[in-house]
Image (tube, rainbow, N blue to C red):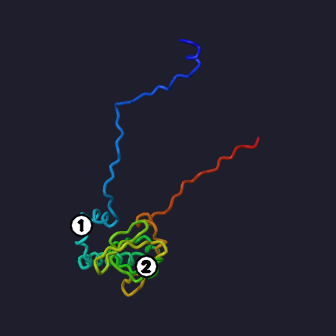
Amino acid sequence: MNKAEADQPSAPKRFFWFDTRIKKLKSGPKSTAPENIIKRAGGLKKEEFKYEKLLPLYELWCGYFKEILASAPHPDERLLKTDFHGCILFVVDSPNPSQIGVYGICLHESKSTFQLLSVKDKVLIIQKEHTTFQFIFDGRVFTLFGSALCQRSFARGRKFKGKLTLPFFLPNS
């Protein structure tokens, strides 16, 4: 080995690991939100969502809400914790002007949307934020502010328990 070869660094060595393979992600058809509702509803097809078929769900919800009003002296406290699946909601105010005046039976409630079935058997997705909803029960009109409902119904019923962190003070030396 001569002196010129010793002064130059050797080429970096490369190692190949043949035991494992990298899995490629397969891109498939992505499902839309209304299709996900259908999957959760037990595999119903869009054609099976009929307003007349869901009216018994509304009657069940009326019985549920009547029990809530009877058990709570102040219904305002329980209104945020109420489950609205089956309720007939009416959109009073919305950032989207085409949604004002729309009403339907609530099929699904997510963190940020209500999905309503209209009288024309169309699934409508209405955002909660900055939207005002109303429903009528026993001749009384209840108003819901969507910004206050921007959580799922089970999360609204819990008290928030934040993590308590105590500051650590070093003694002055």
**Secondary element at tag 1:** loop
Residue 20's image quarter?
Answer: top left
Residue type at mark 1: give it.
Leu
**Left or right of residue 42, residue 7 in this image:** right
**Left or right of residue 33, residue 2 in this image:** right
Q: Name the residue under label 1.
A: 44
Give the residue at the far top of this rendering: 1
Question: Residue 117's spot in the image, x, y percent?
Answer: 31, 75
Residue 133's image quarter?
Answer: bottom left
Q: Residue at x 57, y 53 (%)?
A: 164
- Residue 74 in view of the camera: no
Task: Using the image as rendered, state which of residue 47 and residue 113 is in the foreground.
Answer: 47
Give the residue at the far right of this rendering: 173
Q: Residue at x 46, y 81 (%)?
A: 93
Question: Residue 29's spot in the image, x, y percent?
Answer: 31, 57
Q: Which residue is drawn at 42% across and 75% down?
A: 72
Question: Residue 118's spot in the image, x, y percent?
Answer: 32, 78
Q: Name the residue under label 2.
A: 133
**Mark linked to residue 95:** none
Q: Does 165 sit above or below residue 159? A: above
